[in-house]
């Protein structure tokens, strides 16, 4: 038996490893098994001391089995990934019941021996750990992005996330004794939330993560909590745990920070597991609670023991000792006490937190006792006398007293004037000296009474002034808790109490449910707050019946409210159908359960809810689980390349895609499995040599289960699955390599001019208001000769990013993301926002208002003032520099206004204004910026010319009607307006310089604008582009001052210069010349071009298909694998990861890569190879067979190196 992860010392807990799925566990389990093969299997004993004699080598149990099908599949995949050679280990068997029973007995004996080694009697009470299964455990995790209503604005969602961040942070903060003794109430204020949002703006997640990775434990805590709540970043529950563990276990963390981190981690193991809570989750969460209690003790003042108690009222104000946090208190009340019944050893193992709860309870009991004595002396002073109000207070000054002549000790108190007025008719007869008290019920439960003090954690947050209103909540077990607030008015507190689910253990009901058609033995109960809705009850029922209802959409469940005695239900099953009437059916999903179950708690001896499951779902769930044998065929393959996939029927289409990719290994290494397109067909295999398979209907959807698609056994003589790779068109036997494998020569400037002229002639002139209509524009886009790359309707892979065609577009993107706006730019943006949010009767009113805003900033957009026209069409606004129009504005009064789409219309305005200039100014891209306005939204786009117009968005559609507190949206708008304001003079200056020097400018607009780079000595190196890799931002060229120096120029969003230099120094990558950042965030990477001497593995395998499978090339294939593995191992050990390792990026020397070789055994027993780079493999094979028959000694042919393939470049 071994501990996971392998290599832990006895002092380490190993809590960092807590997988929740087979995929998470597979890497550690696979590593452990490999370690065991090398260090343990076949030896006397493992590291845990469980020894046995080593069996003979030939009978050693090298076959691996597990009872978990998911784990078997993922570990087998992990073995393939890391390169485990024996293929029999790639398929791990799922053990049967008899094997599982034997293993359980063996483990029970082993665990019993371990318990005997325990020095105390506690070990004897510990039950053996349960098996961690993944295939039947599907945790339902909360979605941090679902906050409030789906209709909430992004600003409100972010506000809610900030509230949850503060709530979790404050509830993880240990309480000080002084806060308990003096009744300090903590509350969350709007200012606190806004302050947190401002911090997120100042310290974005990237900076926090960088500090956390650099060893800052406070940053690790904050980043983990941000990931958990989704505040200012994409929520990631798994990664959140990594950083919280770092904060909790780092030696640099102070005790108080460790206590807070452990407190938050307690709840991590509980989320989403209300109906499938496993013992390992309980023990790990209890461990974190215990650690939190330990560090609270370490953080407490050294003046007195943290667990000691001061006398009531003595030194309370100065007592800075710590009690455990509200988060831990809530866990102990809700989870620990209930689970400890089944696991009594927990009370001993986690004694520190159990004792800490007792100490906390004692402090609250002492405070409650003082409060009770105080209330007994003046019972009327702390409770509103109005009948049915229920409001109480912790200090008398919070309530009003009657100002009449009644005796002071009999005066009633009121929480508000309204309550005093409503009680006047009751109190008026007694409002005189010497008369009895008018209060009908002066008794009340104390908010700190012992019946409740131990089970309700107090809220935590910034301290507020003493004094609050309270309202009692009485539970079914007789206990009472209080909702308190020091900021709400009494009326609002009563309203919140009556309408919201204030507690997870109050106002709940338990409903007995039965699925229609099930026997009464399958009755199940669901406990749910009464304030929840019918739709939520359906979700609870679905979770309760996992995995049976895993593929059922909860809203599709039908439910009826019934009242049927459980006893005798078997004898009268027909009575159920008589109860399923329309008036009993729960139709409205938004109806609250409190309006359905009005008469208290339902009787436990009755069935309350009948559930009907969709028939199709039931059939799918109960379907067979045997294997399917599917014959598959890839578009363009030969008829002898059919392959078979065996897969369980209960798997989905996306799993089938993964199996297909694994089957073909290197061939599909560059393809993501979700990008494969599959069709279900039934095509006779015998017809394949004469015709291609045809596909009809839609592609197979990834979520569909194979059992639903193949209800009958497939015919073995047919093809069942047709596969098309990304980028392939119609089925063809000669589809060829993907587009990225081809170079395309850069066309000359003269050819660019001719292509521009041809395009303008092919696409006729049309009024933009007509051509911009969606149907008209789409029709033109379908014609390849008229198509304008604008990412509508689909993205164009061949079009370069605008930031590579002209630096002004890249600068616009940089300014829109990072610029610091000036006072003038902010003023312009705010004026722009004001007129954008106004409502206008007609488009003309909006246009005039916007023109006036820009005119005040000396930007004249109104064409009617300057009398500029584009041909015979007038824009909504534009700017010109001489004869060049560099800004076009297109406006729509509201989103639904007009028949032409503003983006399409602006594109056509640009086409019309540049028709003549495009062929004349062939050495310019003619850059132009679009301002698109539709109602209160504004967006920015860029347009330019290559061989035809190319248009791309530079921003999202930015709403101007955001909330006044939405700083993020306002910053986005201000920066984009600032970027526009800066781009206008830059474009004007560009056209002025171009017009003055257009004859001397040597610029080919078809390739990126950079044509030089800084060398290591600081000098400028100029280069020319020669060819372009189709579909990628990858170019090849040469240095101008040295035509022999070939270079490769690539443009990427991210690049690791250090990683490239590391590989280049070891001869595994081309020489790197430079990595330069360009405006807009793209990086230009210039390296040596080795394509003339090296051939990509993709091209080599395409022209030598037999190399992949032929036995005679096995050693050469192994040599390749060893080379790649060795290089990658060194690369990974240096801290780098290769981001795109596939056959097109592995390049052997072109001469040696195509060399065929055959093994030759000599008389002395040695083996060498005969090889040739010119002979075909079949001829070489026949020659070898012929000479073998003649008995010719191969040594006369000379000997070649055993490892003939030299894979120098990756």
Image: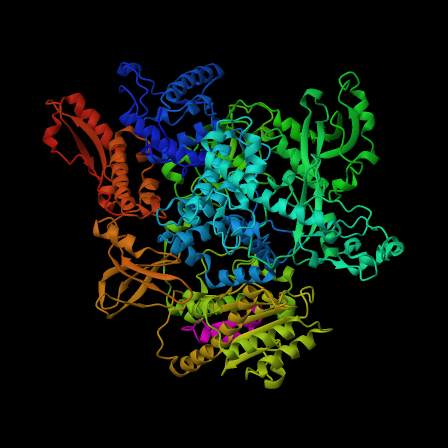
Q: Is residue 703 visible?
A: no
Residue placed farthest to the front in the image? 434
Q: Residue at x 61, y 51 (%)?
A: 147
Q: Nearer the viewer, residue 279 or 461?
A: 461
Q: Position of residue 94 (x, y in %)?
A: 45, 22
Give the vertical position of 1033 relative to 443 (above or below). Answer: below
Q: Position of residue 495 (x, y in %)?
A: 74, 52
Q: Residue at x 26, y 20 (%)?
A: 43
Quarter-wise, where is residue 901 in the image?
A: bottom right
Give the vertical position of 852 relative to 544 (above or below). Answer: below
For the N terminus, which image quadrant? Answer: top left
Q: Nearer the viewer, residue 637 or 79?
A: 79
Q: Is residue 420 left or right of residue 31?
A: right
Q: Is residue 641 left or right of residue 771?
A: left
Q: Nearer the viewer, residue 782 or 13?
A: 13
Q: Is residue 321 magenta?
A: no
Magenta segment, principal secondary structure? helix
Q: Is residue 1 left or right of residue 1061?
A: right
Which region is colored magenta? Answer: 907-929
How many marks are shown on the rendered structure? 0
Q: Residue at x 46, y 37 (%)?
A: 352
Quarter-wise, where is residue 32 in the image?
A: top left
Q: Nearer the viewer, residue 493 or 249?
A: 493
Q: Is residue 908 magenta?
A: yes
Q: Position of residue 955 (x, y in %)?
A: 53, 64
Q: Is residue 462 visible?
A: yes
């Amino acid at each position: 038996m071994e501990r996971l992860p392998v290599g832990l010392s006895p002092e380490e807990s190993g809590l960092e490893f807590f997988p929740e799925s087979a995929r998470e566990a597979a890497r550690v389990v696979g590593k452990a098994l490999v370690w065991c093969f090398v260090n343990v299997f076949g030896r006397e004993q493992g590291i845990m001391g469980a020894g046995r004699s080593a069996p003979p080598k030939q009978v050693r149990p090298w076959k691996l089995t597990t009872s978990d099908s998911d784990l078997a599949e993922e570990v087998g995949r992990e073995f393939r990934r890391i390169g485990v050679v024996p293929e029999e280990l790639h398929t791990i068997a799922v053990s049967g019941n008899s094997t599982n029973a034997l293993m359980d007995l063996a483990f029970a004996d082993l665990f019993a021996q371990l318990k005997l080694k325990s020095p105390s009697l506690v070990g004897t009470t510990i039950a053996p750990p349960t098996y961690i299964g993944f295939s039947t455990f599907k945790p339902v995790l909360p979605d941090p992005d679902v906050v409030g209503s789906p209709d909430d604005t992004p600003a409100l969602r972010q506000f809610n996330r900030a509230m949850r961040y503060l709530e979790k942070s404050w509830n993880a903060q240990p309480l000080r004794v002084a806060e308990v003794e003096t009744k300090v109430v903590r509350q969350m204020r709007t200012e606190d939330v806004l302050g947190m949002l401002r911090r997120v703006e100042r310290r974005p997640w990237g900076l926090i993560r960088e500090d956390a990775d650099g060893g800052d434990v406070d940053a690790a805590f904050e980043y983990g909590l941000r990931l958990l709540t989704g505040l200012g970043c994409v929520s990631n529950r798994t990664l959140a745990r990594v950083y919280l563990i770092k904060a909790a276990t780092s030696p640099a963390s102070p005790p108080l920070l460790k206590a807070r981190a452990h407190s938050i981690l307690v709840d991590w193991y509980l989320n989403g597991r209300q109906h499938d809570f496993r013992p390992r989750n309980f023990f790990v969460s209890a461990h974190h609670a215990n650690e939190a209690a330990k560090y609270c003790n370490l953080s407490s003042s050294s003046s007195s023991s943290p667990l000691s108690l001061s006398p009531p009222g003595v030194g309370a104000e100065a007592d800075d000792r710590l009690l455990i946090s509200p988060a831990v208190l809530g866990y102990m009340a809700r989870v620990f006490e209930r689970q400890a019944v089944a696991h009594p050893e927990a009370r001993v193992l986690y004694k520190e937190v159990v004792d800490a709860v007792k100490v906390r309870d004692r402090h609250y009991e002492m405070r409650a006792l003082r409060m009770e004595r105080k209330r007994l002396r003046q019972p009327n002073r702390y409770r509103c006398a109005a009948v049915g109000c229920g409001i109480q207070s912790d200090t008398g000054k919070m309530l009003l007293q009657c100002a009449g002549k009644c005796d002071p000790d009999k005066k009633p108190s009121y929480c508000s004037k309204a309550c005093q007025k409503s009680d006047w008719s009751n109190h008026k007869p007694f409002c005189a000296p010497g008369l009895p008290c008018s209060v009908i019920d002066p008794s009340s439960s104390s908010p700190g009474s012992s019946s409740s003090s131990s089970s309700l954690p107090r809220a935590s947050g910034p301290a507020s002034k003493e004094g609050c209103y309270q309202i009692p909540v009485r539970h079914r077990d007789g206990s009472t808790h209080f909702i308190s607030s020091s900021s709400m008015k009494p009326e609002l507190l009563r309203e919140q109490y009556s309408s919201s689910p204030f507690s997870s253990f109050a106002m709940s009901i338990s409903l007995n449910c039965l699925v229609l058609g099930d026997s009464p033995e399958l009755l199940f109960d669901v406990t749910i707050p009464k304030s929840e809705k019918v739709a939520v009850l359906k979700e609870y029922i679905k979770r309760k019946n996992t995995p049976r209802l895993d593929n059922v959409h909860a809203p599709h469940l039908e439910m009826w409210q019934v009242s049927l005695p459980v006893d005798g239900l078997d004898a009268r099953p027909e009575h159920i159908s008589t109860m399923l009437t329309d008036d009993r059916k729960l139709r409205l999903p938004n109806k609250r359960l409190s309006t359905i179950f009005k008469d208290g708690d339902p009787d436990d001896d009755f069935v309350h809810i009948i559930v009907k499951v969709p028939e199709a779902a039931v059939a799918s769930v109960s379907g067979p689980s045997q294997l399917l044998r599917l014959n598959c065929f890839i578009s363009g393959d030969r008829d002898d390349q059919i392959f078979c996939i065996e897969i369980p029927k209960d798997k989905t289409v996306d799993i089938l895609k993964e199996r297909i990719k694994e089957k073909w290994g290197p061939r599909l290494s560059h393809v993501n499995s979700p990008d494969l397109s599959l069709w279900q067909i039934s095509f006779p295999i015998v017809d394949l040599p004469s015709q291609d398979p045809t596909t009809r209907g839609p592609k197979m959807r990834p979520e569909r289960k194979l059992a639903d698609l193949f209800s009958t056994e497939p015919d073995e003589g047919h093809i069942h699955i047709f596969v098309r790779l990304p980028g392939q068109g119609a089925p063809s036997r000669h589809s060829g390599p993907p587009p990225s494998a081809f170079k395309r020569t850069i066309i000359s400037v003269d050819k660019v001019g001719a292509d521009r002229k041809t395009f303008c002639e092919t696409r006729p002139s049309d009024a933009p208001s007509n051509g911009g209509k969606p149907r008209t524009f789409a029709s033109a886009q379908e014609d390849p000769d008229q198509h304008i790359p604008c990412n509508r309707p689909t993205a164009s892979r061949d079009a370069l990013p605008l930031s590579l065609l002209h630096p002004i577009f890249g600068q616009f993107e940089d300014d829109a993301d990072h610029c610091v706006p000036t006072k003038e730019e902010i003023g312009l943006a705010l004026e722009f926002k004001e007129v954008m949010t106004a409502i206008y009767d007609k488009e003309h009113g909006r246009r005039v208002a916007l023109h006036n805003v820009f005119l005040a900033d000396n930007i004249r957009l109104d064409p009617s003032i300057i009398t500029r026209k584009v041909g015979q069409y007038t824009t909504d606004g534009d700017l010109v520099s001489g004869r060049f129009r560099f800004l076009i504005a297109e406006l729509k009064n509201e989103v639904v206004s007009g028949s032409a789409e503003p983006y399409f219309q602006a594109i056509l305005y640009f086409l019309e204004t540049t028709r003549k200039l495009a062929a004349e100014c062939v050495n310019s891209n003619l850059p132009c910026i679009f301002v698109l306005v539709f109602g209160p939204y504004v967006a920015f786009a860029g347009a330019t010319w290559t061989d035809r117009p190319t248009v791309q968005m530079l921003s999202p559609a930015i709403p101007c009607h955001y909330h006044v507190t939405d700083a993020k949206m306002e910053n986005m708008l201000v920066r984009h307006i600032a970027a526009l304001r800066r781009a206008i003079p830059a474009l004007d200056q560009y056209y002025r310089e171009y017009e003055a020097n257009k004859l001397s400018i040597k610029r080919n607009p078809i390739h990126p604008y950079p044509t030089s780079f800084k060398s290591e000595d600081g000098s400028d190196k100029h280069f020319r582009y020669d060819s372009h890799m189709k579909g990628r931002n990858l170019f090849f060229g040469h240095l101008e001052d040295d035509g022999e120096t070939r270079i490769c120029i690539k443009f990427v969003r991210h690049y690791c210069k250090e990683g490239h230099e590391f590989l280049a120094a070891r001869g595994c990558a081309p020489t790197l010349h430079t990595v330069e950042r360009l405006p807009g965030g793209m990086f230009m990477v210039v390296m040596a071009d080795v394509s003339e001497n090296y051939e990509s593995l993709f091209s080599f395998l395409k022209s030598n298909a037999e190399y992949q499978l032929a036995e005679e090339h096995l050693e050469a294939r192994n040599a390749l694998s060893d080379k790649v593995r060795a290089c990658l191992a060194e690369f990974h050990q240096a801290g780098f990861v290769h981001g795109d390792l596939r056959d097109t990026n592995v390049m052997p020397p072109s001469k040696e890569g195509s060399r065929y070789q055959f093994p030759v055994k000599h008389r002395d027993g040695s083996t060498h190879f005969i090889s040739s780079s010119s002979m075909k493999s079949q001829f070489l094979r026949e020659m070898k067979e012929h000479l073998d028959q003649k008995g010719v000694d191969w040594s006369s042919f000379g000997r070649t190196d055993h490892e003939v393939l030299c894979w120098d470049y990756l």
